[in-house]
Amino acid sequence: MIEKVLPGIFRIALPMPGSPLQSVNTYLLRGKERDLLIDSGINQKECKTALIKALSELDVSMEQTDFFITHLHEDHFGLAPILATDKSTIYLNFPETAFWADPGRWNTGLDHGRKNGFPGEELNRFFKKTPGFLKRLPLDEMAKAVQFYQENIPAKGIRLQIIGDGERLNIGGYSLVCLFTPGHSSGHICLYEPDKKFLFSGDHILETITPAIFLWSGESWNPLHEYLKSLDKVLRLEIDIVLPGHRGIFRDCRARVAEIKKHHSIREGEIASVLDANGKSAYEIASNVSWNIPLPWEQFSVELRWMALAETLAHLKYMEERGKTTVKPQDNGLELYYPPR
């Protein structure tokens, strides 16, 4: 689907078969000499076909098209190295690009799961039965991006350019300011047009979906703390229109930010109510909070429970650093969480 949203700006909604997200948005900005594609969709046949068809209908030349990637999750990055040419530039953020040097850091899922109370035998069976399981999780989507980088970018002569907070991209009469907004990912970047007051929000702010904030194996940062700071950063801006990475365009950014903050406050309250003097693993805590999934916890797939664990760990990290919970390693290798001292 192609939607003209502003002069010279088109939203292209691309299908994501089998994903609860349903679709992902890419945005085409027409310039005098070069066009810019913000995000590129996932590397799946249906998505690639839809994007190529839309770009053809808009009479876009890939030789004259550059790519801006809001963050390195595969549904936003996957097609860029494939569609880019030796005339293209792909703009990326530094924090996530740095992960490319060490893709092996994400291969500790089993130990991570056991430490946090995930049933070991069940997780082990599932890993063996479904070797592609981790490829559907965000950090391993970044590992997939590594593979694309290694196989496509050097061979095709594509130019990579790291872009940081406050830098500008000028295209089609618009001057877009890069906003570093970590949280949903470690290097997430939005694009803001201060004169026209619109924001390409990537997955930082979505209208009908609360962006997932995960803490994965091997990570030491505090993603929820960073995410909430990034929301406050956006609140300081004048924004009339939000152009997100999924679902529809919307206007009341302040109200949506307030709703997202309220969601995380409620989740923290639920987690606090589960803690007791006996200690709880992150998995036990995750099983006792509410999720926007119309199934009881026992019917969650292993994948859904794994992601719920990662979201719970992000909250626990945020609570721990604020003195709202205490974590203690046990002799059996488990880590248990307790009410604050």
Image (tube, helix red, strand yellow):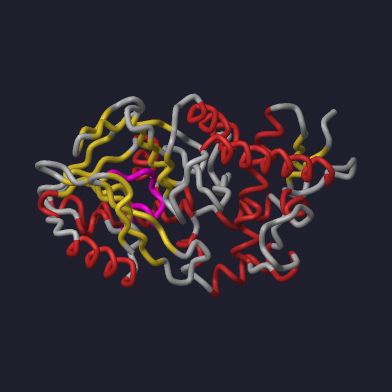
Residue 336 inside the magenta-drawn segment: no
Residue at the right extreme?
277
Where does the magenta region start and end?
68-78
* Residue 192 placement: quadrant: top left
Q: Residue placed at 38% from the left, 55% from the top?
A: 25
Q: Is residue 136 above or below residue 116?
A: below
Locate the C terminus and report the quarter of the image it occupies: top right
Q: Nearer the viewer, residue 289 or 95?
A: 289
Residue lying at 27% horizontally and 29% vertically, measured from the top left: 168
Judged left or right of residue 26, residue 236 is: right
Q: In this rendered view, identify the residue nearer to me: 156 or 7.
A: 7
| Quarter of the rendering containing residue 140 | bottom left
| Residue 74 spot, x, y in % from top left | 39, 56
| Relative horizontal placement of residue 268, taking residue 104 as reference (left or right) | right
Residue found farthest to the bottom: 129
75 in magenta: yes
Tell me which residue sits at (34%, 41%) in the image: 97
Residue for point 84% across, 43% down: 273
- Residue 31 at what x, y percent from top left? 16, 42
Residue 293: x, y in percent?
Answer: 67, 63
Number of numbered markers: 0
Q: Tell me residue 248's x, y (percent).
A: 45, 54
Q: Is residue 204 left or right of residue 121?
A: left
Q: Nearer the viewer, residue 178 or 128?
A: 178
Between 160 and 237, the residue placed more toward the observer is 237
Does residue 249 lie above or below 186 as drawn?
below
Please identify the quadrant where the N terminus is shown: bottom left
